[in-house]
Image: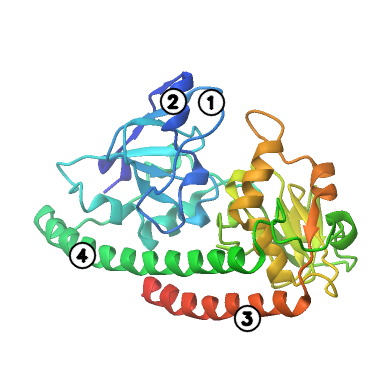
Amino acid sequence: MKFDNIAVNITEKREPVPEDSRFYIGLEHLDSGSLYVTRYGLDVDLKGDKLVMHKGDILLGKRNAYLRRAAIAPHDGLFSAHGMILRPKEDVVDKNYFPFFVSSDKFFDEVIRISVGGLSPTVNWKDLKNLDFDLPPLAEQKVLADKLWAAYRLKESYKKLLAATEEMVKSRFIEMFGNPVTNNKGWNTLPIKDVAPEAPSIEKQTGKVWILNLDMIESNTGKVVEKVFVNDSNLLSVAPFDEGNVLYSKLRPYLNKVVIPDGKGYATTELVPLRPNQKLLNLTFFSHLLRGDDFVTYANSISTGTKMPRMPLNDLRKFQCILPPMEKQNEFEEIARQADKSGSVLQYRIAC
């Protein structure tokens, strides 16, 4: 069956009003592999026409489809024009089965295959609507939907445990080091430019190289959700990095994207390649400092720009970075490492 016989592409748009910002959903609010939208809204007024969504619609990230972002709209409101809104034709597909159909590997493999573009490949409706898919009979779909939702709820319970583990690590950071912005524990400090200056990798990389852009980084956790490799001849406006860097996103700091890379590659210029002096700063400690709620709040408060706010680099360079004794920083790294091990077990169960 052609996809346009299965679902409708909702193209209704309108110009936002200020109150729409509270309920707006952008691609940055969609988590890879999750049918639920757990955060939404912006602190700035929206610009440009947006798609009109209704509760229960399926929100598809049509740009960078390899991130596999498809979620159920939790309320009426506006959705990013860089996305696609799909609504099932209920005479052929059960509305409770449809979210699993759209989030399936089969569907996304096909969407990725027909996406066009370079660094941000995008799927178009004119190509998507003509794809052929098999569908079970409606009665079978209803049975499958009940079983799939039961399994999905179990998976979500594991995700809650994972979130609790991550919150524990954040709490331990505050307990051990206090607020790094106000430095309420009175640690020695130095400007970031002196202890973690901007220093891209000096090693030239050739052939197939890892390219990292912001869409490939999970908010709040620093996890890289997918690695993409391109030929070095296709690189434009990128900075080289290696394992000694901590990559900090100065664009829209409320998205909270900070990464310790596990290899060499090239990053979009929105990612600042900081290089901590490892005699003074543990990489894990430093990344959690930048990712913590206190620093994110500070970065948001001084960001400039409305539609695409950025943290001024001069302010980042001048920020007085706390420097607790290395033994305490290393102790925190061990706590974070043990939490990561527990998290890996939970991630495995989620993936299964």
Question: Which residue is at 46% across, 53% downward?
Answer: 31
Question: Which residue position is annotated with label 3?
Answer: 334
The spot of residue 221 in percent (x, y) is 56, 61
Disc 1 and disc 4 in contact, CB within 8 angstroms? no
Q: CA distance from mark 4 to mark 3?
A: 36 Å
Earlier along the polypeptide chain: callout 3 or callout 1? 1
Check if mark 2's residue and mark 3's residue have beta carbons within 8 Å. Answer: no
Disc 2 versus disc 1: distance between alpha carbons? 8 Å
Q: Tell me the crowding category of disc 4: few under 14, some 14 to 19, or many 20 or more residues within 10 angstroms, Cα based.
A: few
Among the 4 quarters of the image, the one containing residue 290: bottom right
Q: Residue furthest left?
A: 139
Residue 346 vertical placement versus 82 (above, below): below
Q: Secondary structure at mark 1?
A: loop
Whichever of callouts 2 and 1 sits on the residue coming sooner in the sequence is: 2
Label 3, secondary structure: give it: helix
Label 1 crowd bin: few (<14), some (14–19), many (20+), radius 10 Å: many
Name the amino acid, label 3. Answer: Glu
* Residue on which the image places disc 2: 20
Q: Are the residues tagged 2 and 1 within 8 Å (C-beta)?
A: yes
Which residue corresponds to mark 4? 150
Q: Residues within 10 Å of mark 2 (few under 14, many from 20)?
A: some
In depth, the one of 311 and 81 nearer the eye is: 311
Q: Is residue 191 visible?
A: yes
Quadrant of res 171:
bottom right
